[in-house]
Image (tube, coloured by chain):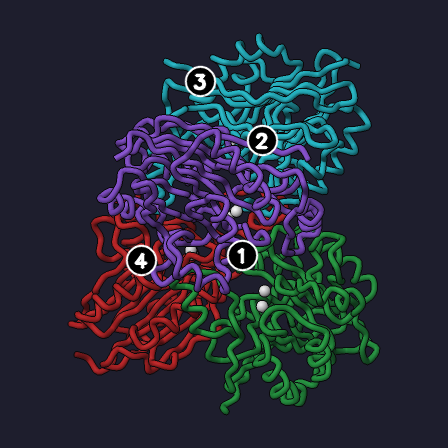
Chain colours: A cyan, B red, C green, D purple
Amino acid sequence: MPNKVKLLFLGDIVGNSGRKAVKIFLPELVKKYSPNFIIANGENAAGGYGLTEKVAEELFSYGIDVLTSGNHIWKKEFFPYLQKTERVLRPANYGENAPGKGWTIYTKENIKLGVINLEGRIFMRPLENPFTVGKFLVQEIKKETPFIIIDFHAEATSEKLGLGYFLDGLVSAVIGTHTHVQTSDERIMPKGTGYITDVGMCGAVESIIGMKINQALEMYLTMVPRKLEVEKSEKVKVEGIYLEFNKEGYTTYIERFRLINEP
Amino acid sequence: MPNKVKLLFLGDIVGNSGRKAVKIFLPELVKKYSPNFIIANGENAAGGYGLTEKVAEELFSYGIDVLTSGNHIWKKEFFPYLQKTERVLRPANYGENAPGKGWTIYTKENIKLGVINLEGRIFMRPLENPFTVGKFLVQEIKKETPFIIIDFHAEATSEKLGLGYFLDGLVSAVIGTHTHVQTSDERIMPKGTGYITDVGMCGAVESIIGMKINQALEMYLTMVPRKLEVEKSEKVKVEGIYLEFNKEGYTTYIERFRLINEP
Amino acid sequence: MPNKVKLLFLGDIVGNSGRKAVKIFLPELVKKYSPNFIIANGENAAGGYGLTEKVAEELFSYGIDVLTSGNHIWKKEFFPYLQKTERVLRPANYGENAPGKGWTIYTKENIKLGVINLEGRIFMRPLENPFTVGKFLVQEIKKETPFIIIDFHAEATSEKLGLGYFLDGLVSAVIGTHTHVQTSDERIMPKGTGYITDVGMCGAVESIIGMKINQALEMYLTMVPRKLEVEKSEKVKVEGIYLEFNKEGYTTYIERFRLINEP
Amino acid sequence: MPNKVKLLFLGDIVGNSGRKAVKIFLPELVKKYSPNFIIANGENAAGGYGLTEKVAEELFSYGIDVLTSGNHIWKKEFFPYLQKTERVLRPANYGENAPGKGWTIYTKENIKLGVINLEGRIFMRPLENPFTVGKFLVQEIKKETPFIIIDFHAEATSEKLGLGYFLDGLVSAVIGTHTHVQTSDERIMPKGTGYITDVGMCGAVESIIGMKINQALEMYLTMVPRKLEVEKSEKVKVEGIYLEFNKEGYTTYIERFRLINEP
Ligand SMILES: [Fe+2]
Ligand SMILES: [Fe+2]
Ligand SMILES: [Fe+2]
Ligand SMILES: [Fe+2]
Ligand SMILES: [Fe+2]
Ligand SMILES: [Fe+2]
Ligand SMILES: [Fe+2]
Ligand SMILES: [Fe+2]
């Protein structure tokens, strides 16, 4: 059992710009932190909506160990890959016959890291309760390893903070994703769990959560629904969080980061 | 000015099954009621989602004068047609630069019929206020004709009844669409406006609002989002309403109908 | 075991006007149908929001056997009564520590009637899955009696029809409530279950789902939230459904009704 | 016209704990920044829900110039005060007959500061369009002063970033409120407008967005709705933002802050 486990977690990777940002900045981050594990949320990595096998493999080639996801993962063409892979998760609180897996125990350098993906229900789909599903999975995974992280892909700050307090002392970290805007509230909770409401995103800097500004504004002015395209700018950023866990699995260090290139 | 204006209104036509139902039953309805105008909601006529030029023309060929629509009309390929036609409406309370028209004055047999399409906001998109937009348009169209009908495409019964009372005495009829289930509350409101919360749909009888039962149930069990396909059964129905307006434009007669074939 | 079981079900009773309507019309309905059981949805019976012990007892005194409810039942003052009574249900798909009971087997004249109350999740709270919770409870209650009815308190027609098809052949009837507007789609489903999307309400005729028209319109025009008051008119109605089940528990007869007084 | 205008803006003040935090930390902040104006969002200042005259006056006594608000401001007892005061705003994009004012030009030390309060529509009420209402008001106020700030009280990050880009170069700052969690994305937009997605809150540190943890968790586990109480802890925080505007009204400096006491 290691004395310290180091984790790097990247926020929602949005399209081509997001993948480019990961490619540019991940070596730098690895050099700085030498993490044992690199996790990222990939729900928007292929064209802004979902994943493909090719895109997932591209992200693994950059050094990412496991991809979590969220509400945007459900592209039918991706279901066969979701079914067979252990390295891409979908939220665990979908119904029991949903394709794919909601959690994994990923082993690397002889360390086991439990990763659980959950999706919020406030302003989102009416899924199974992430609090009860989450706690149940934590108790199962605890039998195998003290290192457990949760990607809580959710909209409402109240629900995210709620899960943070609910699992405080039971998991290594509760890391929020989905809003694509990084919050400044990273901290170690009273009982030792690392927490941030949202880690942010990887993608175009001048964009509306990664997508084209003019298209989003046209939508807000006309209210006509439309599929937005990924903003393809040269100026990209990576947002995420770095955590260190002690051998009991608790967070001893947490640091939020944002790297922007100046092309 | 005629002494009596007779209107036939058909609920949301869902896909191929809905078009088949219209083709089968419209001659029968025309024979029975000899309406001056035939209006139908076409938002689901092409494959369950939206309209195409070809499908619109098919429906006009059956005798429909004007097609109203709703939240499902916004398919990009259809925008050019929406822009040029006077016979397909989209809800009037989208932003001012949205493609298409939200109301029309349709003239036939020397009678002018004002048709306004509005969309609700409760559990739907945050559009312009259908109450204020609706009232403004009614006042404009009143200058031309006393015969004005509203297709209020909305979810919440409270909002639909609200618009009914709000426009009671100002229009000939407020006709609800969108839920695909016919209500039994057709009536003449206290000040003379014909009203029904929802006229229902045209499409497959054994279906979930026109779509495949097993696909909808799979969605409700797994909560994984999916595009549902139109149920293609032989047993189809037409649901709608027949109204008569006096020369002041008020409703003097209202009759709900549902015709089902037995193949 | 009886050869036939007769059930009368009344839609959401809204405030004082709704209770008055029940008092006026229930004797008439009993005379006409001589039902074995009378069930009503009472979620709006006390001032339009929730129930009180006094109001529940008043409704029982009119002959109602069991009161079902829905989203509006959760008034803290009512929790102690909810906990002890077997005759007022709250939706079964709230979390397991929610106060009250979500189903009952009510015995009368030696007949056992299973009553399950469920709440929808589309446009409503993210509760437990009404499909899986509902099916589980049906299987339990089946061990005791073939007569099982479901009050599915839900907004979306698609979800209501979905549960109807899902439980078709497994229960005596799936009866929709919550929208306060009666639908015209009552029927016996293919496998023998009685079904209606919504039975409607009991309360003031000239009202917006039982509440004051001018207050609701003020809300729709300003969008300022407000607690609406029950419309207290003399002209009231009762809406509901009458069903007959054969000894296997299937529906053999279904009839929708609406009674309005002319004061 | 001054060469520099300095603004201090505090996030949603939550109940007694939030007011205590303002009382403790505002003198310190004033000493550090010597702002020309102090604005705060007061929508949760009285017991967590809304404002009262007494609470508003208390906050003014600490040095706050203008209170903005949001979805929680609509307590009937507060309408008379809202109507008469110029120092408490409600979002401007409610219907035209809503009580109170949505914007003001506040003059102090001979400087005029335009303050506009807007509310988002994504996952919130279907109000008037904040983009078009906002732009119209900006154009009006521009005639009087170049110093204009917007409190955009909204949930969705996409809508908040959208308004930021939409008004970039037209106003001094777009400041987000409502989520009660501070984001780390404060910046000067490309055309000179200061921006942050959310400034955070003032209130209890160990709380769920200011409210009692155990009550919120009970709600998330049972899904039974309940009114949450303000967490009354000794450990409180103030979150907000400090901005400097040049004489053209553009932001030249922006700094996010969080002060926590250690009782
Ligand atoms: Fe995302
Ligand atoms: Fe997401
Ligand atoms: Fe439709
Ligand atoms: Fe629709
Ligand atoms: Fe109700
Ligand atoms: Fe309800
Ligand atoms: Fe707030
Ligand atoms: Fe708020």
Residue A260 disc label: 3
Q: Where is mark 1, residue-wise?
A: C158
Q: Chain of mark 1?
A: C
User: Residue at (80%, 14%) from the top-left corner?
Assistant: A1
Percent coordinates x, y for residue D213 in the rendering: 68, 44
Left or right: residue B206 versus residue B104 is right
Q: Amino acid at mark 1?
A: Ser
Q: Nearer the viewer, mark 3 or mark 2?
A: 2
Q: Nearer the viewer, mark 1 or mark 3?
A: 3
User: Residue at (68%, 18%) from the top-left corner?
Assistant: A244
Percent coordinates x, y for residue A52 in the rendering: 51, 25
> Is label 2 within 8 A of ligand 7 (CB to nearest ligand atom)?
no
Badge 3: how crowded within 10 Å, few (<14), some, or many (20+)? some
Q: How much space separates mark 4 and mark 1, taking CA atoms?
A: 25 Å
Q: Amino acid at mark 4?
A: Leu
Q: Nearer the viewer, mark 4 or mark 3?
A: 3
Q: How much space separates mark 3 and mark 2, taking CA atoms?
A: 20 Å
Left or right: residue D83 versus residue C158 is left
Q: Nearer the viewer, mark 2 or mark 4?
A: 2
Residue B132 found in image quarter: bottom left
Q: Where is mark 4, residue-wise?
A: B59
Percent coordinates x, y for residue B262 in the rendering: 49, 66
Q: Determine the secondary structure under disc 4.
A: helix
